Image (cartoon, helix red, strand yellow):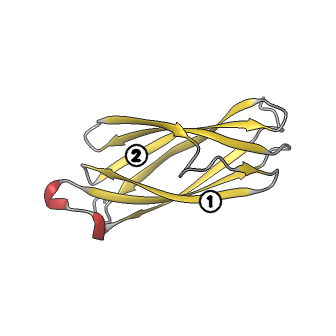
Amino acid sequence: MSDSRYHVDVRVVTHYLADQSQPEHNRFAFAYTITVQNNGELPARLMSRHWVITDGDGHVEEVRGAGVVGQQPLIKSGGEHTYSSGTVMTTKVGTMQGTYEMVADDGKHFDAIIKPFRLAVPGALH
């Protein structure tokens, strides 16, 4: 059973960036907006990220780093933090998933799971 003091949900909205893509060179740009919502009982700081990006050919790239877009936001209980970022892939379709390392105000480290989400050029999937 999970501890209700440490509960963070992650929502994702994706967009294909046609103006930054070059399909003739297998360059497909995507933006994503993420909302990290702290549904736990304690404030928690987003310390780092770990992404697993898989393109349509099955090639996997892992990205790790401090915070998100240069920030390590403290998210109060019931609060949320929203940010936008992006990635470039060599295929029309791919997925991203990962975790955020969080630290609650009481010093406990825990992971917020980022469930797999799809990046796809419109019309690439039936």
Question: In the visual, does 119 lie left or right of 109?
Answer: left
- Residue 22 - label: none
Q: Judge depth for marks 1 and 2 and give the one in front.
A: 1
In percent of the image, x 71 and y 45: which residue is there?
A: 8
- Residue drawn at x 86%, y 44% is 41
Q: Residues within 10 Å of mark 2 (few under 14, many from 20)?
A: some
Left or right: 77 as drawn, with respect to 118: right
Q: Quadrant of residue 59?
A: top left
What's the residue at 59%, 38% (across, down)? 48
Looking at the rendered image, the quarter that the C terminus falls into is bottom left
Q: Amino acid at mark 2?
A: Thr
User: Split into 4 quadrants, where in the image is the N terminus?
Assistant: top right
Can you give x and y, in whole percent of width and height, for residue 31 in the image? 42, 60
Using the image, determine if residue 33 lies above or below residue 105: below
Return the disc, 1 or 2, that comes first in the chain's sequence: 1
In-front residue for pair 28/115:
28
| Viewer can see residue 80 | yes
Give the labeled residue for mark 2. Answer: 95
Question: Within 10 angstroms of label 1, few (less than 14), some, or many (20 or more) residues?
Answer: some
Residue at 71%, 57% (x, y): give it.
80
Residue that carries the numbered disc 1 in the rendered image? 82
Give the residue type at disc 1.
Thr
What SS does tag 2 mark? Answer: strand
